[in-house]
Image (cartoon, rainbow, N blue to C red):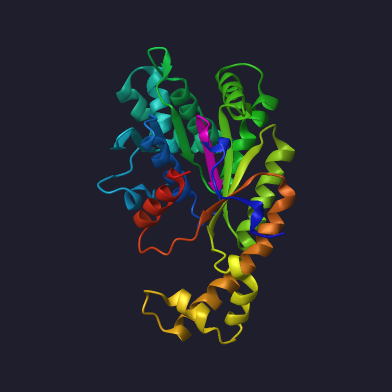
Amino acid sequence: MTQQLLETRLGPAFDRRFLFITGKGGVGKTLISAMLAVRAAQRGERTLWVEMSEAPRGGHLFADFSPRYQLVPVRDHLWAMNLRVQPAIEEYLAVAFKVPFITRLIARNTLFQVLTGALPGLDSLIPLGKLWYELGRKRGRKPYWDRIILDAPATGHALAMLRFPQAALDMVNSGNVADRSREIDEILSDQTLTSLIAVTTLEELPVDETRELVEQVHAETPYRFAAVVCNSVFPDIGRDQDERFQSWLAGAEDAGLIDEALAGTGANPDWLRARLQWLESRRRAQQQWLEALAPLSVPLARAPWIPAASEAEVLAALVEEFSAA
């Protein structure tokens, strides 16, 4: 079983109105979520990209953009925000009390913060409630947003968020918390509206954490992952002439192959062989971890390895890769 497990184009799961994207820290989930947001905006879809981070990455991805809680235009058809719990609580209380000054006093009161910190699931309910509100907004008779893409927290916190609606409904049957939990549950359960997407790299720890996340969500909630994106997948350079390529990597002389590989590059043959030996060893290692994801029975998508100098350059290359799909 090899790289044919991977879809090389993004399927229908990536074109639903609400994309909930999570993954182990450091695997590129922010890049993937931003790529999907830019891709949607380029097609003329009114798109909201939402980070949830105390150290947001949006400023590294988009020039002249400073992440904040308030919605900020990023480029044509694309807006962004950093959805943090404290300002979300203040906004919620402002709606409830309708007096902003009193709201700030309450929300920033130390005792209130201690009490809300002790309430299990508040840090899931408030952000999910904000997303429920944005999904329900209208422009006339049409949705205000054609697409909302959430760069959700890493796997542990994301799992807590996905567990919350059902856990809350097990504890309370009526009131604001129950009503909001039902509404959030409906959104997450609707596979025509929502896609849960996990991002991983093909390495031991990220793959193990992704498998655990998907299995736990499927076992403990009614929600289902629509896709797993395998990020930074190395190319199969020798797939068209595998036996010949592998023989050359192992040290065999092959002037014809070298001439083809070096045409127009000016590269040293020994340097090229060493570089491709490294790349091929990494690719083969990735195949082992790719096979470990197969039992999840979730579609696997491929995002290529892109050797670029900055996150903004990687984002631009990813957008170009998938905009052609």
Q: Where is residue 55 shown, x and y percent of the image?
A: 39, 50
Q: Where is residue 262 shown, x and y percent of the image?
A: 43, 77
Q: Residue at x 55, y 83 (%)?
A: 254
Q: Is residue 35 left or right of residue 252?
A: left
Q: Residue at x 40, y 49 (%)?
A: 320
Residue at the top extreme?
141
Q: Nearer the viewer, residue 151 or 156?
A: 151
The range drawn in magenta is 15-22
Give the quarter of the image for residue 1: bottom right
Q: Residue at x 66, y 18 (%)?
A: 173
Which secondary structure class fits the magenta region best? strand
Q: Where is residue 198 shown, x and y percent of the image?
A: 58, 46
Q: Residue at x 39, y 80 (%)?
A: 267
Q: How many marks?
A: 0
Q: Is residue 20 magenta?
A: yes
Can see residue 83? no
Q: Where is residue 23 shown, x and y percent of the image?
A: 56, 50
As drawn, 214 above or below 77: below
As drawn, 285 above or below 252: above
Q: Is residue 258 magenta?
A: no
Q: Is residue 132 left or right of residue 109?
A: right
